[in-house]
């Protein structure tokens, strides 16, 4: 058995992702997104996807290109405010949405990757996150076709005081797609600063993790203390080069002094 997890192209890396698959996709806005792998899925027209990601990119980049092509059935996200096509599809009943608080989403992915079925958190207690009723899917006439269900709430003593906590179930997916700055042939990954964001968590949650890397190096060239995600979580790795396009979601500048 070889430990070399490299594949020759992004198309080869995603070739076995079927219609109806669930995906955990790294990135935050347009930062650290696995765009080459996303484009490979778009070219294959893989559809009916259930995607877990912090958000859905923008209309013409990131996961937004899959959404615009009608390939995403459901999104599990914490922020959806930068994509007009997302809004249209959600409000018209073409897209199912499971809104999840950002920290809770991160922990649900981490728990899934760690083999933990669920956890209790104070986030969402006293809101529709815990009590249910959040619209997950609308009907064509604007009525609510699917609403979130109530979640168990339990009281625990923390720091000497009783508090209510809501039970959140872990997330696992069929596949995970992530982008890294550097990786070796064994799948050990290094992410670039804030581009690290959700990527290690998504990688852990996916049954099969596919990583695109800007630079592929030999085993041992990455210092063990510098590894952000160990190769045990990565199944396939494809080198995409340092010239991959990286867009800025909102370009802001400050006035000169």
Image (spheres, rainbow, N blue to C red):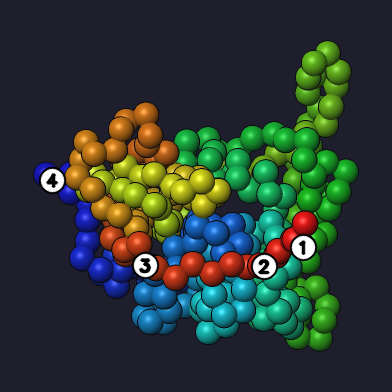
Query: Taking 232 as reference, is 128 above or below it?
Result: below
Please state which of residues 199 and 130 is positioned toward the viewer in this rendering. 199
| Separation of marks 4 and 1 at Cα, in angstroms | 55 Å
| Separation of marks 4 and 2 at Cα, in angstroms | 43 Å
| Separation of marks 1 and 3 at Cα, in angstroms | 30 Å
Residue 52 seen in the figure: no
Q: Nearer the viewer, mark 2 or mark 1?
A: 1
Residue shown at 29% from the left, 72% from the top:
11
Q: Are marks 4 and 1 in contact (CB under 8 Å)?
A: no
Would you name the residue on which mark 4 appears?
2
Q: Is residue 90 left or right of residue 198?
A: right
Could you classify mark 1 by the number of other residues whose Cα lies within 10 Å: few (under 14), some (14-19), or many (20 or more)?
few
Would you name the residue on which mark 1 appears?
255
Which label's residue is closer to the chain start, 4 or 2? 4
Which label's residue is closer to the chain start, 3 or 2? 3
Q: Is residue 74 left or right of residue 125?
A: left
Residue 156: % across, % down: 78, 23
Would you name the residue on which mark 3 appears?
243
Looking at the rendered image, the quarter that the N terminus falls into is top left
Q: Is residue 13 left or right of residue 97?
A: left
Which label's residue is closer to the chain start, 2 or 1? 2
Residue 222: % across, % down: 29, 38
Label 1 sits on a secondary structure element that is: loop
Residue shown at 65% from the left, 59% from the top:
77
Query: Taking 177 as reference, is 152 above or below it?
Result: above
Which label's residue is closer to the chain start, 3 or 4? 4
Could you classify mark 3 by the number of other residues whose Cα lies within 10 Å: few (under 14), some (14-19), or many (20 or more)?
few
Residue sticking out furthest to the left? 1
Residue 201: % across, % down: 50, 45
Residue shown at 30% from the left, 33% from the top:
223
Residue 200 seen in the figure: yes
Would you name the residue on which mark 2 appears?
250
């Amino acid at each position: 058995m070889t430990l070399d997890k490299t594949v020759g192209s992004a198309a080869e890396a995603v070739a076995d992702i079927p219609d109806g698959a669930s995906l955990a996709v790294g990135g935050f806005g347009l930062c650290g997104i696995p765009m080459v792998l996303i484009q490979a899925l778009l070219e294959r027209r893989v559809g009916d996807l259930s995607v877990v990601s912090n958000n859905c990119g923008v209309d013409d980049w990131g996961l937004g290109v899959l959404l615009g092509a009608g390939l995403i059935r459901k999104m599990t996200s914490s922020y959806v405010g930068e994509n007009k096509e997302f809004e249209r599809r959600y409000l018209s009943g073409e897209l199912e949405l499971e809104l999840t608080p950002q920290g809770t989403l991160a922990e649900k992915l981490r728990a899934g990757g760690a083999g933990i079925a669920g956890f209790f958190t104070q986030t969402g207690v006293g809101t529709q996150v815990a009590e249910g009723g959040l619209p997950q899917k609308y009907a064509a006439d604007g009525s609510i076709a699917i609403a979130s269900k109530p979640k168990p709430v339990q009281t625990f003593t923390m720091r000497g005081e009783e508090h209510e906590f809501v039970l959140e179930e872990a997330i696992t997916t069929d596949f995970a797609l992530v982008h890294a700055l550097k990786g070796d042939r064994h799948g050990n990954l290094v992410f670039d600063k804030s581009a690290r964001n959700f990527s290690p968590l998504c990688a852990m949650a996916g049954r099969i993790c596919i990583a695109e890397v800007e630079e592929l190096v030999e085993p041992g060239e990455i210092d063990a203390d510098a590894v952000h995600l160990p190769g045990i979580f990565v199944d396939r790795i494809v080198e995409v080069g340092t010239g991959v396009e990286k867009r800025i979601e909102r370009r802001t500048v400050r006035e000169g002094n």
